[in-house]
């Protein structure tokens, strides 16, 4: 190489460095990136590294995980010692099983595990050329892995073009820009290869090549093969881009080939054949070109020494071949390739989609099946493209409409709301302004982006009515989606009139409404009145989550939240959420993040909840989802109130209220009011807390279809109790008992018993209700509510039975509030502890360094449970439990489980 001394030095430092493990070479086409990669490979091999090379291929850029399979295929074949979890992740994305695809994080960790095993004996260099053509799923995993190679014997080197956007643009990996050669170096390179070039031709080559090495080496060949001194000017004037001039150069050579050789090159180009790192891919074996020696002689192909296969000399050769072919030639090649790949669904679908012009139901069915396969492997965006093409090729009008509606639905959940709207509008009957599918697409867009519940409810209800009465045509899938969306709208509206119209319409449909639709309508509308009978169904559904589409998982998890059994869904949500946010159903991914945040708040993982809330807020803002952005702010306001950050909570409460109230979004205004209640309680402003609480529901009743009515039970009772409204407090606690709240959910059982204990008219009743609350099997899953109940009971016991009797309740409440970071409540609890005559204890200070989850794990470990048993109880893997214990031991100054048990025993003593 000429003029690349600086870049070669950088690559030498990269190969030998222990500080930088990933590097991206970025430059224009033909600038020499591939040569620099080969130089790095030679350096690595000389240093004793194993090397794996792969290359992105434009023909495979829409096939999920095709690039990752090409990169890892040489490593997966003979590896031993790979754990079952990692193998399962690879099987899911590479087609070994039909299980649900893992998230980017899960798959990335599996890749890191594989690489560490491979590199255990020899350092490993992964080299990826043409990274801009890597499919999005693979690029996301490579970016994840590249950011986590620090300190490992594995390095990742990627080359990408500057003129094509890719996921590596935002991968935040270190970069080395590869620029054109200087004028002096360009002249040296040209003179070294063509020392006898005429003066005029030499000057023209240097002017037109602009320091691009590929142009410098190829243009003189073009001149020599053309008649006349003006041959180089035939490539185009200076205004024509360099890649365009190079394509004209290669085009002249392609035209000189026979028709049979050009046809062979075309099939290779269309199938992604001919990279220098060819290997079998996740979608099958690539086509291998034959009888193409003339193309080698013309400088268009090389022969790969290791395999003897023909490979394209440069990616521009491949693209030029495709561009020069006529549409009929391309279609014929695609038909041949579809037959070659008849056993590989997605690759066959790719070629059939390009080969077919007229409607063909058999081809459309293949494309639809490929879309289902892509969705199962986390490729919702690829599924939209296949479904759209399947609709175009549908011979039957109804089938076309159904497939377009499916494409629009998936596009909407992939945060492509505009595309969804265009898809359904393209299917409108001439003269009509809407169809059931177009109403669905419009309603999702209006709801998610602007929070419109009023007009969307009217339009969706009208569309369902037409389908019910036969006044409109639509598939069962569209009808089901409309009915579910009607319940989604009702949930966000939180309005009695809207819900009553919804239930009336669903009742009129009789057998047309499925059990799942009835579940959503009942639990989402008013869990107090309609939720108790559905808990078992929602719990049983956890066994089949991998078989469900992501939006169905999210809907069931919303029901689980209302029933306070969300912790059973959270592990699976965490497993798939990152996948959905990258190449899958982004809208469902945002719903999942909200649900993960709510469960983190419930179980006391408040720092994690803050991170999750901020993450989903930024994603919602990025996609223009005003509804989800405001919902994120509402939950963050609640969290701030819990933590005693009253000013921040009230600011966010006001922001949510200003956006949601004019739109009639009762769901969000209730969350905002709840944040106001909590902020006031934390600050000890019980009068303000009471006024906020009765704005949600009057004392002694639970406002119909107000989802926060039951959730704020303890808030209203506590505020009424502290403001001397003992009758209202007692009436509200009794109303909770009489409404059967303890049978609806574990959290409602806990706070109902706590409210009854707080308002009990006798000490016997107070003790009995408190014992029911504290001994509830799920009480520990709601540490904030349990601590409040213990604090209230401790205060009552101190006044009736004396300081010593109250101390255990007050100390336990204080520790819980301190662990949670509930500053307002913690301060109040410390005052009560001090009133019992107890001073601060060192062991308590140590325990406050534990998160609530860590304290729970410590308690279970001290009780003698194994990691597996703890994981089963807390829905964690044994490895995660082990990691928590690894952090817990030094915090408490212990090294064994026995010492942990002793430490916790000493802490329990007063």
Image (cartoon, helix red, strand yellow):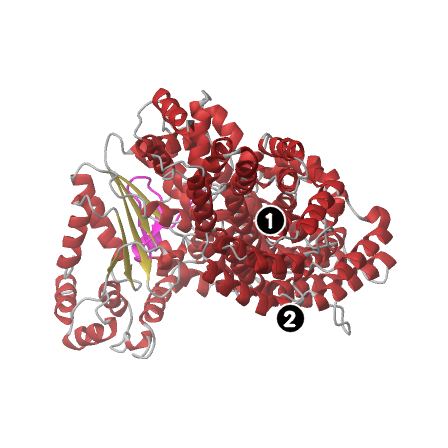
Does residue 690 sit above or below 842 in this rendering? below
Q: Is residue 261 left or right of residue 685?
A: left
Q: Which of marks 2 and 1 is in front?
A: 1
Report x, y in % for residue 497. Answer: 78, 61
Q: Mark 2 points at which residue?
A: 662
Res 718 label: 1
Q: Is residue 544 left or right of residue 260?
A: right
Does residue 647 sit above or below 812 in this rendering? below
Q: Quadrant of residue 801?
A: top right
Residue 747 lies within the magenta run: no
| Quarter of the figure that contains the C terminus | top left
User: Is 332 in front, or is 869?
Assistant: 869
Q: Is mark 1 on a helix, strand or loop?
A: helix
Q: In this view, does 94 lie to the left or right of 145?
A: right
Give the residues in magenta. 285-314
Of the numbered discs 2 and 1, the one sitting upstream in the chain is 2
| Quarter of the figure that contains the N terminus | bottom left
């Amino acid at each position: 190489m000429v003029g690349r001394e600086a870049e070669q030095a950088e690559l030498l430092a990269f190969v030998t460095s222990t500080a930088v493990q990933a590097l991206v070479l970025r430059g224009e086409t033909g600038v020499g990136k591939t040569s620099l990669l080969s130089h790095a490979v030679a350096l690595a091999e000389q240093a004793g590294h194993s090397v794996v090379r792969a290359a992105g291929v434009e023909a495979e850029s829409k096939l999920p995980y095709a690039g990752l399979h090409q990169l890892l295929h040489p490593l997966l074949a003979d590896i031993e010692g790979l754990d079952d979890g990692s193998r399962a992740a690879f099987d899911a994305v590479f087609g070994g099983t039909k299980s649900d695809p893992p998230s980017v994080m899960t798959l990335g960790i599996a890749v890191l595990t594989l690489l560490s095993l491979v590199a255990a004996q020899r350092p490993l260099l992964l080299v990826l050329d043409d990274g801009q053509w890597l499919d999005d799923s693979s690029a996301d995993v490579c970016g994840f892995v590249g950011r986590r190679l620090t300190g490992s014997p594995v390095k990742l080197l990627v080359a990408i073009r500057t003129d094509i956007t890719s996921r590596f643009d935002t991968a935040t990996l270190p970069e080395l820009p590869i620029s054109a050669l200087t004028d002096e170096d360009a002249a040296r390179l040209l003179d070294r290869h063509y020392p006898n070039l005429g003066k005029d031709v030499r000057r023209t080559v240097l002017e037109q090549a602009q320091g691009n090495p590929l142009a410098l080496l190829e243009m003189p060949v073009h001149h020599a093969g053309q008649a006349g001194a003006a041959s180089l000017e035939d490539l185009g004037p200076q205004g024509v881009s360099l890649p365009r001039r190079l394509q004209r150069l290669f085009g002249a050579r392609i035209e000189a080939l026979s028709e049979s050789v050009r046809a062979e090159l075309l099939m290779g180009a269309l199938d992604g054949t001919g990279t220098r790192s060819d290997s079998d891919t996740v979608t099958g074996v690539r086509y291998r070109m034959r009888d193409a020696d003339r193309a080698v002689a013309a400088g268009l192909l090389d022969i790969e020494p290791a395999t003897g296969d023909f490979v394209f000399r440069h990616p521009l050769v491949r693209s030029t071949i495709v561009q020069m072919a006529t549409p009929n030639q391309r279609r014929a090649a695609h038909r041949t390739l579809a037959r070659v790949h008849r056993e590989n669904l997605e690759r066959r679908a790719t070629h059939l989609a390009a080969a077919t012009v007229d409607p063909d139901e058999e081809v459309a069915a293949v494309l639809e099946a490929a879309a289902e396969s892509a969705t199962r492997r986390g490729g919702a965006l690829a599924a939209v493209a296949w479904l759209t093409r399947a609709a175009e090729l549908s011979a039957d009008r109804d089938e076309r409409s159904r497939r377009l509606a499916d494409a629009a639905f998936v596009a909407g959940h992939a945060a492509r709301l505009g595309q969804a709207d265009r898809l359904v509008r393209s299917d409108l009957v001439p003269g009509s302004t809407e169809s059931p599918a177009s109403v669905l697409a419009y309603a999702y867009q209006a709801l998610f982006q602007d929070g419109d519940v009023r007009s969307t409810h009217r339009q969706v209800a009208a569309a369902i009515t037409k389908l019910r009465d036969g006044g409109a045509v639509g598939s069962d899938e569209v009808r089901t989606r409309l009915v579910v969306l009607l319940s989604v709208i009702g949930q966000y509206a939180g309005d009695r009139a809207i819900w009553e119209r919804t239930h009336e319409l669903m009742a009129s449909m009789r057998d047309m409404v499925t059990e799942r639709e009835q579940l959503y309508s009942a639990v989402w509308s008013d869990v107090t009145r309609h939720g108790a009978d559905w808990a078992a169904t929602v719990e049983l559904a956890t066994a089949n989550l991998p078989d469900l589409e992501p939006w169905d998982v999210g809907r069931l998890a919303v029901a689980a939240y209302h029933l306070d059994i969300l912790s059973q869904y959270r592990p699976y949500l965490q497993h798939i959420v990152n996948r959905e946010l990258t190449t899958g159903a982004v809208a469902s991914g945002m719903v999942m993040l909200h649900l993960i945040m709510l469960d983190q708040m419930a179980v006391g993982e408040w720092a994690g909840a803050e991170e999750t809330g901020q993450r989903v807020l930024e994603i919602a803002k990025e996609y223009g989802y005003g509804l989800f952005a405001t919902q994120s702010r509402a939950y963050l306001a609640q969290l701030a109130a819990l933590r005693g950050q009253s000013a921040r909570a009230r600011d966010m409460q006001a922001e949510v209220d200003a956006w949601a109230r004019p739109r009639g979004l009762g769901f969000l205004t209730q969350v905002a009011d709840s944040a106001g209640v909590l902020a006031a309680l934390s600050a000890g402003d019980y009068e303000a807390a009471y006024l906020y609480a009765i704005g949600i529901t009057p004392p002694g009743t639970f406002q119909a279809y107000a989802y926060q009515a039951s959730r704020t039970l303890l808030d209203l009772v506590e505020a009424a109790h502290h403001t001397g409204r003992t009758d209202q407090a007692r009436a509200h606690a009794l109303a909770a008992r009489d409404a059967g709240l303890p049978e609806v959910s574990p959290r409602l059982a806990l706070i109902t018993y706590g409210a009854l204990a707080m308002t009990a008219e006798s000490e016997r009743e107070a003790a009995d209700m408190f014992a029911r609350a504290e001994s509830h099997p799920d009480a520990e899953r709601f540490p904030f509510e349990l601590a409040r109940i213990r604090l209230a009971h401790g205060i009552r016991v101190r006044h009736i039975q004396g300081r010593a009797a109250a101390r255990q309740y007050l100390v336990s409440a204080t520790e819980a509030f301190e662990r949670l970071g509930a500053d307002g409540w913690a301060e109040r609890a410390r005052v009560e502890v001090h009133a019992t005559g107890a001073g601060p204890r060192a062991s308590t200070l140590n325990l406050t360094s534990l998160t609530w989850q860590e304290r729970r794990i410590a308690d279970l470990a001290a009780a003698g449970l194994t990691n597996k048993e703890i994981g089963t109880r807390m829905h964690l893997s044994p490895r995660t439990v082990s990691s928590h214990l690894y952090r817990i031991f030094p915090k408490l100054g212990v090294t064994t489980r026995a010492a942990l048990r002793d430490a916790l025993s000493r802490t329990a003593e007063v």
